Image (cartoon, rainbow, N blue to C red):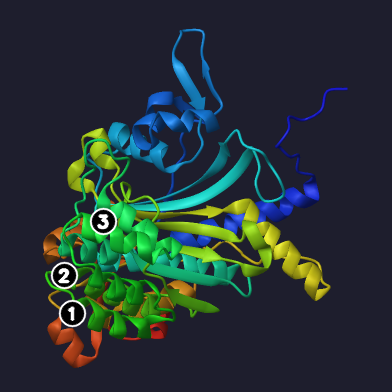
Amino acid sequence: MVQRPRGTRDFTPQVMNRRLAFEQLLENCARASGFNRVQTPIFESLDLFTAKSGPGVIAQLYNFEDKGERQLTLRPELTAPVMRMIAEEMRNDTKPLRLSYYGQCYRYEEFKKGRYREFFQYGVELIGASGPLAEAEVIALAISMLDACGLKDWQIRIGHVGILKGALSGLGLSLETPTGASEPPVASAMRFLDKGDDAGLANLLETNGIAASNAAPLRALADLEGGSETLGPAREILSSLDGVSLEALDELQITLDAVVALAPAPPSLAVDLTVARGLDYYTGMVFEVIVPSMGGEGQVLGGGSYKLLHLFGLPDLDPCCGFGLGFDRVLLALEAQAVAEGREEVVPGESSDKPMIAVIPFNIDVQKVLPIVGQLRRSGVRVELELRGRKIGKAMGWADSIGADYTFVVGPRDLEAGNGMLKSLSTGEQTAVALDAESIANSL
């Protein structure tokens, strides 16, 4: 009897109904923040993934030669294919791009519950706008998705690769790999910090002509635990180190403040400055979501700001920001949660046909409108926030090009008057509306 391949699954109608409901819930959340679905082929050129991850990744791939003697592989993840698609199909599209995607991925590895050879990933990418606010948009969407599906007792850990990386390079450690070495000194130092190897860190500093006494404040920085309040002590530590910039820390503070305005409060939020993975890939903010009750398979989501489009001749669009959500792992966590509570697992969610509104802050601190944007999205309204600081004429053109039904412009005089200008792009009618989410939603 022919059986399904090892590491794959079949989904019965009952299971599939749950999966479809979860996929639709995620897509509704993504669309509420202006993200639109794309899809790429299940197989791609092998070069796409070796260019990103090096030839060592081949051992984990389902790669093959087709009848035309082309080297192909089943995709192991979805970010690189989406970047390839942008370079080929979307170079001239209006930026920033907000893209969502979902589909099967394949990795040849030993499987167990929560880790399969064929697995499903949902993700988003924000391309063409960078910085703390763009990062906050991505984090807020991740939080909103997990909040909407009813997952409990999870923790989001947010860090910034640039903080420790900048501190180490500011002290004099190189970001380049020396001849005969396997990694840059900065990467080695971050690995020592991550593993708690203080002796190795001190030795590395001395080898590079840096006083070993700097190891102590670096360790103190890495050991900080807690929420956004840890940024105060982090600032004091960084200020005590010669030549170290506070720019990355300031950016993380802006990101965290914006997340508070845009997203519902997560069950637990921690600031983690020791994230050391993917130094050649991630460039700024990094974050992950952990469900502690799931043990070794408890990481259900991860992402951050990264550089990848330069590999496709589009360096001006780097860095990008996005995340991948482990579709199977979140469902497993929801199922375990339901069993523990003695109920049938239900994935909430329903489609929304509400109009789309483009919020355009003009010559004001964008933080002033973030709470309104977050509240509108949580009420089910599709909202896209203008991130590039365009002048009004170009901003209105941008809103029209992305298919918005309305624009809501807020300028300095509007803030003083306590309202903004809501415009229907189909009729041209403009109305002054109070600066609160309920008034705006009722006016659509």
* Residue 186 sits above or below residue 139 on the image: above
Q: Which mark is residue 244?
A: 2
| Left/right of residue 56 with respect to residue 391 in the rendered view | right
Identify the residue position indicated by label 1 in the image: 239
Q: Earlier in the sequence, mark 1 or mark 3?
A: 1
Confirm whether residue 256 shows in the render.
yes
The percent position of residue 358, horizontal first and vertical second, equals 30, 66
* Residue at disc 1, secondary structure: helix
Identify the residue position indicated by label 3 in the image: 400
Return the residue nearer the eye: 261 or 398. Answer: 261
**Label 2 with label 3: CB-CB less than 8 Å:** no
**Label 2 with label 1: CB-CB less than 8 Å:** yes
Residue lying at the far top in this picture: please name it. 68
Q: CA–CA distance between discs 2 and 3? A: 44 Å
| Left/right of residue 13 with respect to residue 150 in the rendered view | right
Quadrant assignment, res 270: bottom left
Q: CA–CA distance between discs 1 and 3? A: 46 Å
Q: Amino acid at mark 3?
A: Asp
